[in-house]
Image (cartoon, helix red, strand yellow):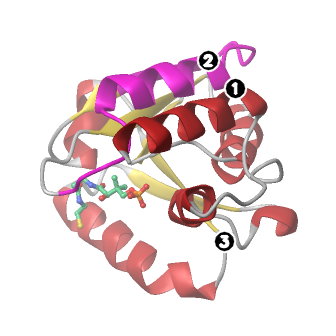
């Protein structure tokens, strides 16, 4: 049984994440999405909200489960019996940070492999940060995330403004 974890902030999940989730889930028996609880960052959504949004967005993918985590991604992988960490690569600008993380993770846990999936071209520019920025200024979000997630973003931005 090959288990992979895909750790991330998912604040919130975008079409870019969903593309990586859908495509990579078919390569593993189980794909566990780890939503990072990072007290150093101030996310738009709480970790519980991000987990719930991600659960709804991945409802139809039978081998995907969603869990919150704190601490190191390699520890999250080990605790869940995962042999692989999945990360998406959008463009060369992601590469330096992702390579450094993958190499650090390899030093910490040589038994866990990082596998990169290149994001589909149509989402190569997209990030949760970009989506939130456009949302704050009233732009059209329909190319960035499913309608249910857009509603959550708009509700949150209006209540936290
Ligand atoms: O969606 P993000 O914010 O790009 O995800 C970054 C994430 C969660 C993968 C990364 O910050 C992470 O793994 N954090 C947990 C701490 C850790 O394991 N760091 C890696 C060693 S450099």
Residue visible at 73% across and 62% down? 119
In which quadrant is the N terminus drawn?
A: top right
For label 1, the residue is 148
Q: Is residue 83 left or right of residue 137?
A: left
Q: If you read the primary sequence from the N terminus, does the residue marked by circle 2 or circle 1 appear first?
A: 2
Residue identifier under label 3: 90
Label 2: few (<14), some (14–19) or many (≥20) C-alpha neighbours in 10 Å: few
Looking at the rendered image, the disc whose residue lies closer to the viewer, 1 or 3, is 1
Task: Answer above or below: position of 18 versus 137.
Answer: above
Instruction: Tell me, yes or no, whether the highlighted magenta stretch contains residue 44.
Output: yes
Quarter location, residue 127 = bottom right
Residue 126 visible to an observer of this rendering: yes
- Across and down, in percent, residue 91 comes to 66, 80
User: Residue 103, position in %: x, y?
Assistant: 32, 73
Q: Which comes sooner in the sequence, label 2 or label 3? A: 2
Stretch of the chain drawn in magenta = 41-67
* Quadrant of the rendered image containing residue 115: bottom right
């Amino acid at each position: 049984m090959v288990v992979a974890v895909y750790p991330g902030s998912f604040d919130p999940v975008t079409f870019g994440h969903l593309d990586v989730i859908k495509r990579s889930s078919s390569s593993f028996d189980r794909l566990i999405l780890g939503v990072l609880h990072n007290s150093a960052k101030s996310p738009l959504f709480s970790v519980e909200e991000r987990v719930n949004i991600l659960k709804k967005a991945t409802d139809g993918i039978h081998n995907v489960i969603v869990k919150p985590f704190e601490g190191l991604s390699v520890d999250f992988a080990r605790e869940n019996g995962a042999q692989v960490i999945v990360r998406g690569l959008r463009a060369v600008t992601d590469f330096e940070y992702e390579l450094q993380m993958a190499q650090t993770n390899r030093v910490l846990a040589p038994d866990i492999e990082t596998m990169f999936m290149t994001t589909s071209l149509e989402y190569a520019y997209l990030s949760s940060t970009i989506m939130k920025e456009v949302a704050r200024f009233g732009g059209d979000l329909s190319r960035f995330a499913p309608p249910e997630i857009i509603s959550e973003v708009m509700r949150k931005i209006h209540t936290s403004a």
